[in-house]
Image (tube, rainbow, N blue to C red):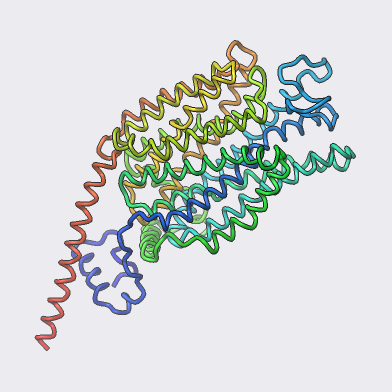
Amino acid sequence: MPPFPNPPNTSAEESFENDLTVLNDPLLNKSHPPPSPPVEFSWRKVTPLLCLVTLIAYCSGSVITAVAPTIQTVYARESTHNYTYSCSNEADNDSYECGADHDDLYADPCKDASERAQAMAATSDFAKNMLTFFFSAHLGAVTDRYGRKKMLLFSLILMALPAVAFALVVHMVSCTESDPSPTNISILTNLVPLYYTVNSLTGTINFLTLIFACLADLTPPGPRRAVAFGLLLAIFMAGISCSPIITLLVYNGDNTTAVNVACFVWIFIVPAWVIFGFFETVTPAKQFEARVAHQNEVASRPPRSRFHSIFLAPFLSLKVLTRTKLFRILCTVIIIVEMVNESTQTLLLYYITTPPLCFTQEDMSVLMVTIGLSGIISQGFLLRPLNKLMGERRLLLFSSVAGMFHALLYAFADTKALVFAGGLLVCFTLFSLPTVSAIKSNNAGEAEQGQIQGAVYAVKSLAGAVGPTMFRFIYDWTKDGPVPGAMWLFGAALYVVSCGVIFLLPEKEANSKYHHAERETEEEEEVLNRSKMVRFAEDEGVRESSVV
């Protein structure tokens, strides 16, 4: 018998004999895990996963909301050497009033600080997304072979580190107000780059990659999978959007308390939930199948040194992106669309705090809640009927058209109302990621869902690395021109290009209603062939016993 069941270049007769050997060999049957039952959607299994996403979203939102104004204030104080200076419009006495005239000495310190903070955030996100690009698909493939629970726990512990670093930044901001000693100022100055550095390292193990793979394990292939992915994103958005409201209502707008509570949840409650309330979603049979497929693939490669193979492993895992024409087109769509989406997530909160928009912390909280609620409605209630009505291909097209109008509203926004209108349209642009993830997932094997979702997020991260950098360049080049929001015009143009690429998607492969019908036919044929093999093995056994 060959070292692995049905290795490459095995003929149909040899494959049939190998399968019969597996059936008749009691030793091999004892080591081979029993086959996994068909996947059926169950709220009992999915609920722990959704609760985990809610906790992470709340912690992330509590930190994200406080980062922009805090870092902006730190840089403004550093430039003015006034450590009671604040860039919040609600501050008293020495506060900064957005859009007002400033003396020649400081010009507009908070606007300069905002641009500096944008540059730091864009650089940090570039490094973070490049790490995700290199490691996401490879680690996803590893979780296919050995399970996702341990890797998920490692990723959440890694995500807690920037929250702790930012909590130290917030603490030192308060310390320098009461005691602006050189020591405190030096510590604060070094903590800000530390926060951005640690935040970059979280890209090594992407949390959402593992969550999407877990959800794919628990959801049967077909139209329901895109809806499940959309629901997960809706819950994630809801947690992020509600966190600033909780900060205002429960903690009276005290970011220090909100960040400290988020750190406590992240360090103690989240790991405990994963260890005791979360179960492994990859069955032993699927892990065995993934390991066999990996060993066969390794055996088929030309001989290399061990170091060479390890070095190339992340790149070899990305080969799944170019497997078919469908996958190549979907990768192009994700790169174009996510360049805009990632740039919006990274730069919008900094952009709207400067003149002429002058958003306050309350305005930003309301904007995030508006985006979150619209996302819940669209992903939780509209995605399923729209997907059923349009199909995945037309749904992607609709998402890009909505994204074009959303970017145009940001480009020409000179009032807060236009920003809120653009925020309402963000929810439709979020259809693209779950839809593309579902299309790729439906066109891949059940034992490679981790690698597929990792590859999708690798492409998304590449767009996240390139997009904000390009948008920042366009903003620096046009910020003093007639259209300060010209970077959003570039985003609208990218959405137009994505519409043209989406038209190239093959109708039958992209839409799950065709693919699901074909999969059901294939599964019926596989069950029929398997039953024939079992009957053949039994007949052979009867013949041998009769001969004896």
Q: Residue at x 60, y 26 (%)?
A: 472
Q: Residue at x 66, y 25 (%)?
A: 353
Q: Residue at x 46, y 57 (%)?
A: 143
Q: How many marks?
A: 0
Which of 100/328 is in front? 100
Image coords of residue 25 (percent x, y):
27, 77
Residue 363 makes an appearance in the image: yes
Image: 534 above or below 96: below
179 sits left or right of 245 in the view: right
Q: Residue at x 22, y 47 (%)?
A: 518
Image coords of residue 109 (percent x, y):
77, 23
Image coords of residue 490 (percent x, y):
51, 21
Residue found at the very far bottom of the displayed protein:
548
Residue found at the very far top of the displayed protein:
482
The image quadrant where one finds the N terminus is bottom left
Res. 365 image quadrant: top right
Image: 505 above or below 451: above
Image coords of residue 252 (percent x, y):
70, 38
Image: 20 above or below 433: below
Residue 458 makes an appearance in the image: no
324 sits left or right of 171 in the view: left
Image: 519 above or below 84: below
The image quadrant where one finds the C terminus is bottom left
Residue found at the very far front of the displayed protein:
249
